[in-house]
C-alpha cells in the first residue's frame, strides 16, 4: 500500500482507488470513520486507521454496517465530518437506519462509501448501490477514475454540508483495487471543541432533535434538499462530455465503465463520430445539463455495470422532454445490447459500438476463447478454490461432514458469509447447503429447527464465523434459543475477520487503530443467551466429531459448538509451524483398498501432494503449514508429525 | 465370487435396506463406519473393487463356493447345514455362575479355548447402554462380561478387521449366522492379498431368526421410556411371545407383535438359522432355556467340545428326538421363506450385468428347498 500521508501538494502519487478515497476524506477534514470489512471496500478504513493518531481521527471497525452508519452519523450530528464505509450488501444491513437518517438529515458533512462488486469477484452477489440513492432520496456520486475518486470524495462532504443530508459515493472493484496517479491536496488541521446541540426548537435542523418526524415536514424538506442538489449538479465539473458537436451516437456512462468507453472509442477511431457523456452525479440527474447533451443526437447507448440504472433514469427524462429533444433510439441493457449481469469490459463495449456503427470489430479471433480454454485445461493443473494449508475450516468441515454422515439422517449445514462459505465446494466436503447473508445460516437453521412438527427429522446445523457472530448471528441465536429451535450452531472462531484481511471485531482485545479494546467472550455470550456451549479445538478431529454427534443426538434446544483455532494466516501463526510433517512411505497405502488416498483425494490440503509415479503421498515443504491435522486423517498412520 | 465396488455396496446393498450392520465393511478404511446400528459411507471411494463388498454377507454370496471353502463340501440346502453331531449342553462346574443367555455354553467354550491356548483372543459382543459393542477380550473375566444376547444388530466384524490390521491372529469369534458368513468370506482372502494369514482359529455361531434395527428400536422405545433407564433387554424363547425390558426397579413386557416391525429388513432374506459356517453353533434349548442346543460342525469344534467337557468347562447331554425335529422344521422354514423372498425380490442368482445378487446357489437346490 502506498504512503498517502502527508506529501504536500502538488505531489503526484500512485494510489489505489480505495486509498484515493481515504485521501479525499482526509483532505475534506474527516474526523470519524466507521465501517465493516468487506471486499472491495476494506482498505479505506484500514488506510484511515493508520492515519488516525497523526491526523486526529477516530476510526473503527464496527460490529456491523448498521452500527457503523450510526457511529458515523453521531459525528455528523455533532457537526463534524464523518464517513461510513461498507460493501454493498452492508448497505442493505444499514438500510433501515439510512431510511431514517436521510429523513432526519445530517449536520457535519457525512458520506457513505458503498463498494459494489460487479461480476461478484469476491462476493456471492452483484448487489447494486445506485437504486438506494433513489429509494432513500439522497444524492449519488460515481467517480470515473482515480483522481476523481479523491476529488469527488472531498467534494461529497461539501455537498452533504450544503444540503444537510447524507451523500452516497459508489465505487466498484476495478476502481477500488486498481491504482492510478493522483495529485494531492492539503489536509486541514482540526481545531475546536465538538458539541451536540439539542436544546433549540425541536425541529430546528442544527439545534433541535435529530429525527425523521414529523414525517410530512421532514420528507418535504428532504425533497427540497434533492431539488437543491439538482441545481448544484447542473454545473458539476464531474459530468463531462467529450466528442463532436453532432455525434452519430452518444454514449452515456459512469464509473469505471467510462474508461472502457474511452478505450473503445479510441481503438475504433470513432472520436469524430461518437461522443461520451460521463456522468459523475448519477442521482438525481441534472435535467438541463442532460437536455443539452441529449439534444446532440438521436441514438443513445448506455454503458454501465449490473442494473440499467442510468438507462432508466435517462429514459424517464427523455419521456418528460420528448417535445423538446425529439424521439430517441436507445441501446443498452433493456434491448440486450449490453449484458444484464457480470462485469463490463472494453471488449464488450468495443463489440457493441462496432455493431451500432456498422463496423466489423476484429477483436479476439473467433476460436481464441476456445483455444485459450483448451490450453488452460491441458497445460495447467486443475485448481478448485480451496482453504489455505493449515486452515482450521478444512478440519472443522471434515469433522462436521463425518458427523453428519455417521448420524445418517440427512442432516445439513446452513452457512453464511466468510471463507467458510467455500464449504459449499469439495474443499469443505460440500457440507453447506444454504448460503445467504451474514448471520443467515443461524436464522435459517432457527426456522428449520421448528419443522420437526411437520415430520422433518433431519439434524440442522449452522455455521458462522467469530466476526459474523457479532455482526448478525446473535439475534438469530437469540431467536433460536427463545423458540427452543432444535439446532446445533457451530461458531468457527479463527480469531479475526480473516477473509477480508484480519480486521478486529468485538471478540478481540484490539481496535482498528491498534489500541486496547474489550474482547467479548463468545461462549459466555451464548451461555448467557441460554444455549448449551462446548468449546473444541477443530484440529482434534475425534473430539470435535464426538461432540457434534452428541449434540445432534440431544434433539432439543440450541447447542453451540465453538471451534476455536486461529486462521493459518493470522499474524500469530504466519511462518510458524507447530509440527514438522513427514510421510513414512512404507506405511502409505496410496490408492489401494484400505485407504483410496483419502489425504490427497478427499482432505486435499495444499500441503499434501500425490506422487503419481511413486504411488505415494508427499508433504510439500513449501506450502505445508505444519498444523498436523493430516496425521489424524491418514488411516494407516503413514503421516508423521514431530513437534518443532 | 464376484466382487464389486464400494459405491455398489452403498447403493445396491445399504440403500436397498439389505444391510444388517454386521460390521464386515467397517474398520477397513476411512469410508465405511458403523454408528448407532447403521453403516454410513463417509466419503465416496472410487475403487472398482473393495474388501468391503467382498466381505459383505448380503452381497454376492455364492453358498456353494462358501461351503466348498469352509466344509470342503458343496452346499446341499440341509436345514442345519453340514454338521457332525448335535447335543444339549451347559456350563460345567469350572465356570462361575453368572447371568448367561441360556446355559452359558458359548462363554464356557471361549473361556476354555482362551485358557488352553486354542485361541489367544476372542472377539465378542458386549454392550454400552443399550447399544451392542464389539470387544476384543483375552480373559475369562472379560468373556463373562460379554455374556447374554443383545438383540440389536452388532457390528462385531469390524473388530475382526481391526484385529487383522493390528496383525493379531489365533482369534476366536462369536457371532450370528450372517456374521459367520461374513467372517468366512473375509477368511477366503477375497482380494488375494499378499501374505494373508487366516486370523480366525475358532468360530462359534449363534442360532438366530432375526435381529432388530437399532434406530427403529430406539425410536420405538424412547416413546415409552427413557433409554438410559434400561438395564437389560431379553427375548425369552417361545412360547413366551414377549420382549422383557428390565429397568432399575421395574420389569416391562412388550408383546413381540409390537417388536416385529423393528426387525431388520435384511433378515428376511437370510437363509441360515443355525450359523452353518462355523466350527460350533449354539442356540437356546427350547425345552429348558437353562441349557443350549449345540451343533458340532468341524473337527476343530469336536476337539474343543471334548476338551471343554474333560476340563469341566462344559456339560453335555443328548438332544431329544422331538427337539431335533422341531429344530429341523424351524431352520428349514427360515431357509425356505428367505429363498422365496429373495427370489421374488430379484435378489437371487441375478444376471451378470444387473444389480448384485444377495445369494447364489444352484437352481436345482432352490427347487428342493422351496418345495
Ligand atoms: C440377535 C440374536 C438372535 C438370536 N436368536 C435366537 C433364536 O431365534 N433361537 C435360538 O435358539 N437362539 C437364538 N440366539 C442365541 C441365544 O440367544 C444365545 O446367544 C445362545 O443360546 C447362546 O447362549 P449362551 O448362554 O451360551 O450365551 P452366553 O454364554 O451368554 O454368551 C452370549 C454370547 O453372544 C454374543 N452376542 C451377544 N449378542 C450378540 C450379537 N448381537 N451379535 C453377536 N454376538 C452376540 C456375546 O459375544 C456372547 O459371547 C440369538 C442370539 C442373538 C444375539
Ligand atoms: S451387511 Fe455387513 S458388510 Fe454388508 S453392508 Fe451391512 S454391515 Fe456392511
Image (spheres, coloured by chain):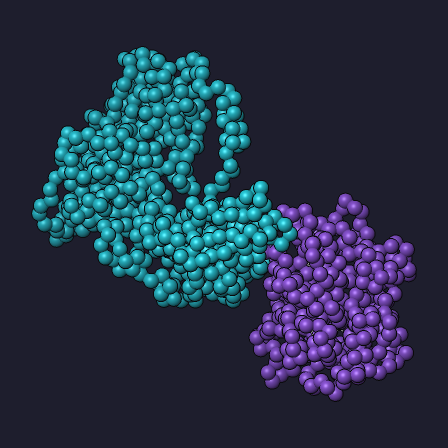
Chain colours: A cyan, B purple
Placement of B300 over or under A18, stated as above or below: below
A86 or A562: which is nearer to us? A562
Query: B269 or A152, which lies in front?
Result: B269
Residue at 62% across / 63% down in the picture?
A: B166
Q: Residue at x 57, y 75 (%)?
A: B228
Name of the residue lying farthest toward the bottom: B93
Name the residue at the left extreme.
A192
- Position of residue B281 measured from the top left corner of the image (x, y, whole percent): 79, 72
**What percent of the width, then of the height, locates residue A77?**
18, 48
Quadrant of the snapshot with the C terminus of chain B: bottom right
Whole-percent x and y of residue B328?
87, 71
> Is residue A125 in view?
yes
Location of residue A145 (image quadrant): top left
**Quadrant of the displayed image that contains ligand 1:** bottom right
Q: Position of residue B41 (x, y in %)?
A: 61, 55
B9 with respect to A284 (left or right): right
Is A362 left, or right, of A324 in this rendering? right
Amino acid at each position: 500500500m502506498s504512503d498517502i500521508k502527508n506529501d504536500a501538494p502538488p505531489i503526484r502519487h500512485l494510489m489505489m482507488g480505495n486509498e484515493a478515497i481515504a485521501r479525499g476524506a482526509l483532505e475534506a477534514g474527516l474526523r470519524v470513520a466507521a465501517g465493516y470489512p468487506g471486499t472491495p471496500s476494506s482498505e479505506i478504513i484500514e488506510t484511515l486507521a493508520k492515519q488516525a493518531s497523526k491526523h486526529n481521527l477516530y476510526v473503527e471497525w464496527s460490529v456491523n454496517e448498521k452500527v457503523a452508519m450510526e457511529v458515523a452519523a453521531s459525528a455528523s450530528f455533532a457537526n463534524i465530518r464523518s464517513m461510513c464505509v461498507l460493501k454493498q450488501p452492508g448497505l442493505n444491513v444499514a438500510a433501515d437506519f439510512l431510511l431514517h437518517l436521510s429523513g432526519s438529515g445530517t449536520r457535519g458533512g457525512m458520506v457513505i462509501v458503498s463498494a459494489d462488486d460487479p461480476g461478484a469477484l469476491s462476493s456471492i452477489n452483484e448487489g447494486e448501490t445506485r437504486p438506494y440513492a433513489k429509494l432513500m432520496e439522497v444524492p449519488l456520486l460515481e467517480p470515473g477514475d482515480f483522481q476523481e475518486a479523491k476529488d469527488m470524495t472531498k467534494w461529497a462532504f461539501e455537498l452533504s454540508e450544503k444540503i444537510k443530508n447524507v451523500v452516497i459515493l459508489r465505487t466498484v472493484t476495478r476502481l477500488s483495487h486498481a491504482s492510478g496517479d493522483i495529485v494531492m491536496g492539503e489536509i486541514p488541521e482540526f481545531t475546536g471543541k465538538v458539541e451536540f446541540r439539542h436544546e433549540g426548537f425541536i425541529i430546528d435542523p442544527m439545534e433541535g432533535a435529530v429525527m425523521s418526524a414529523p414525517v410530512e415536514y421532514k420528507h418535504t424538506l428532504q425533497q427540497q434538499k434533492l431539488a437543491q442538489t439538482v441545481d448544484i449538479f447542473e454545473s458539476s465539473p464531474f459530468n463531462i462530455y467529450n466528442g463532436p458537436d453532432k455525434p452519430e451516437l452518444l454514449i452515456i456512462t459512469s464509473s469505471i465503465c467510462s474508461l472502457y468507453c474511452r478505450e473503445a472509442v479510441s481503438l475504433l477511431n470513432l472520436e469524430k463520430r461518437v461522443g461520451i457523456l460521463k456522468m459523475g452525479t448519477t442521482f438525481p440527474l441534472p435535467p438541463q445539463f442532460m437536455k443539452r447533451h441529449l439534444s446532440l443526437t438521436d441514438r443513445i447507448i448506455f454503458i454501465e455495470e449490473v442494473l440499467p440504472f442510468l438507462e432508466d433514469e435517462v429514459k424517464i427524462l427523455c419521456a418528460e422532454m420528448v417535445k423538446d429533444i425529439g424521439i430517441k433510439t436507445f441501446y443498452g441493457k433493456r434491448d440486450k445490447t449490453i449484458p444484464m449481469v457480470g462485469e463490463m469490459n472494453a471488449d464488450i463495449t468495443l463489440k457493441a459500438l462496432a455493431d451500432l456503427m456498422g463496423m466489423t470489430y476484429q477483436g479476439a479471433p473467433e476460436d481464441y476463447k476456445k483455444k485459450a480454454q483448451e490450453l488452460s485445461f491441458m497445460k495447467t493443473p486443475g485448481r478448485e478454490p480451496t482453504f489455505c494449508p493449515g486452515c482450521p475450516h478444512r478440519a472443522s468441515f471434515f469433522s462436521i461432514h463425518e458427523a453428519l454422515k455417521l448420524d445418517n439422517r440427512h442432516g445439513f449445514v446452513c452457512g453464511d458469509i466468510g471463507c467458510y462459505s467455500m464449504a459449499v465446494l469439495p474443499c469443505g466436503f460440500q457440507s453447506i447447503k444454504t448460503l445467504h447473508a451474514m448471520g443467515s445460516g443461524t436464522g435459517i437453521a432457527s426456522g428449520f429447527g421448528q419443522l420437526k412438527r411437520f415430520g422433518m427429522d433431519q439434524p440442522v446445523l449452522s455455521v458462522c464465523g467469530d466476526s459474523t457472530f457479532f455482526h448478525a448471528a446473535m439475534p438469530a441465536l437469540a431467536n433460536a434459543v427463545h423458540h427452543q429451535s432444535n439446532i446445533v450452531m457451530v461458531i468457527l472462531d479463527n480469531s479475526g475477520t480473516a477473509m477480508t484481511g484480519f480486521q478486529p471485531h468485538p471478540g478481540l482485545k484490539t481496535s482498528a487503530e491498534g489500541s486496547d479494546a474489550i474482547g467479548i467472550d463468545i461462549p459466555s455470550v451464548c451461555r448467557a443467551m441460554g444455549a448449551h456451549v462446548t468449546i473444541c479445538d477443530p484440529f482434534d478431529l475425534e473430539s470435535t466429531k464426538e461432540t457434534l454427534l452428541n449434540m445432534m443426538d440431544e434433539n432439543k434446544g440450541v447447542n453451540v459448538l465453538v471451534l476455536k483455532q486461529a486462521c493459518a494466516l493470522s499474524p500469530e501463526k504466519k511462518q510458524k509451524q507447530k509440527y514438522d510433517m513427514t510421510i513414512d512411505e512404507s506405511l502409505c497405502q496410496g490408492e489401494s483398498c484400505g485407504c483410496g488416498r483419502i489425504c490427497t483425494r478427499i482432505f486435499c490440503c495444499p500441503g499434501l501432494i500425490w506422487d503419481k509415479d511413486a504411488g505415494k503421498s508427499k508433504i510439500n515443504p513449501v506450502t505445508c503449514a505444519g498444523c498436523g491435522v493430516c496425521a489424524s486423517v491418514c488411516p494407516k498412520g503413514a503421516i508423521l508429525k514431530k513437534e518443532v | 465370487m464376484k466382487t464389486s465396488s464400494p459405491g455398489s455396496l452403498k447403493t445396491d446393498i445399504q440403500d436397498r435396506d439389505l444391510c444388517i450392520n454386521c460390521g464386515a465393511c467397517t474398520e477397513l478404511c476411512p469410508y465405511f463406519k458403523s454408528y448407532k446400528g447403521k453403516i454410513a459411507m463417509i466419503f465416496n471411494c472410487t475403487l472398482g473393487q473393495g474388501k468391503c463388498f467382498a466381505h459383505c454377507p448380503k452381497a454376492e454370496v455364492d453358498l456353494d463356493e462358501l461351503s466348498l471353502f469352509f466344509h470342503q463340501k458343496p452346499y446341499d440346502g440341509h436345514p442345519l447345514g453340514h454338521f457332525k453331531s448335535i447335543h444339549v449342553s451347559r456350563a460345567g462346574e469350572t465356570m462361575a455362575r453368572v447371568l448367561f443367555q441360556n446355559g452359558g455354553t458359548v462363554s464356557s467354550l471361549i473361556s476354555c479355548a482362551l485358557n488352553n491356548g486354542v485361541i489367544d483372543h476372542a472377539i465378542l459382543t458386549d454392550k454400552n447402554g443399550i447399544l451392542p459393542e464389539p470387544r476384543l477380550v483375552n480373559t475369562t473375566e472379560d468373556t463373562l462380561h460379554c455374556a447374554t444376547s443383545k438383540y440389536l444388530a452388532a457390528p462385531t466384524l469390524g473388530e475382526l478387521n481391526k484385529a487383522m490390521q493390528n496383525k493379531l491372529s489365533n482369534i476366536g469369534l462369536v457371532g450370528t449366522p450372517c456374521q459367520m458368513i461374513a467372517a468366512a468370506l473375509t477368511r477366503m482372502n477375497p482380494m488375494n492379498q499378499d501374505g494373508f494369514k487366516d486370523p480366525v482359529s475358532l468360530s462359534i455361531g449363534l442360532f438366530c431368526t432375526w435381529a432388530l434395527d437399532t434406530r427403529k428400536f430406539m425410536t420405538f422405545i424412547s416413546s415409552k421410556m427413557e433409554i438410559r433407564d434400561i438395564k437389560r433387554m431379553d427375548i425369552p424363547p417361545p412360547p413366551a411371545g414377549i420382549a422383557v425390558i428390565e429397568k432399575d426397579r421395574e420389569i416391562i413386557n412388550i408383546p413381540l407383535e409390537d417388536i416385529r416391525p423393528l426387525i431388520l429388513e435384511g433378515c428376511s432374506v437370510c437363509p441360515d438359522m443355525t450359523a452353518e459356517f462355523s466350527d460350533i453353533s449354539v442356540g437356546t434349548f427350547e425345552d429348558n432355556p437353562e441349557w443350549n442346543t449345540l451343533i458340532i460342525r468341524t473337527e476343530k469344534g469336536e476337539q474343543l467340545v471334548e476338551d471343554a467337557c474333560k476340563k469341566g468347562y462344559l456339560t453335555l447331554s443328548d438332544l431329544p428326538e422331538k427337539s431335533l425335529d422341531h429344530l429341523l422344521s424351524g431352520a428349514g422354514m427360515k431357509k425356505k421363506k428367505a429363498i422365496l423372498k429373495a427370489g421374488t425380490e430379484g435378489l437371487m442368482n441375478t444376471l451378470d450385468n444387473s444389480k448384485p445378487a444377495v445369494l447364489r446357489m444352484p437352481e436345482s437346490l432352490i427347487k428342493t428347498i422351496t418345495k
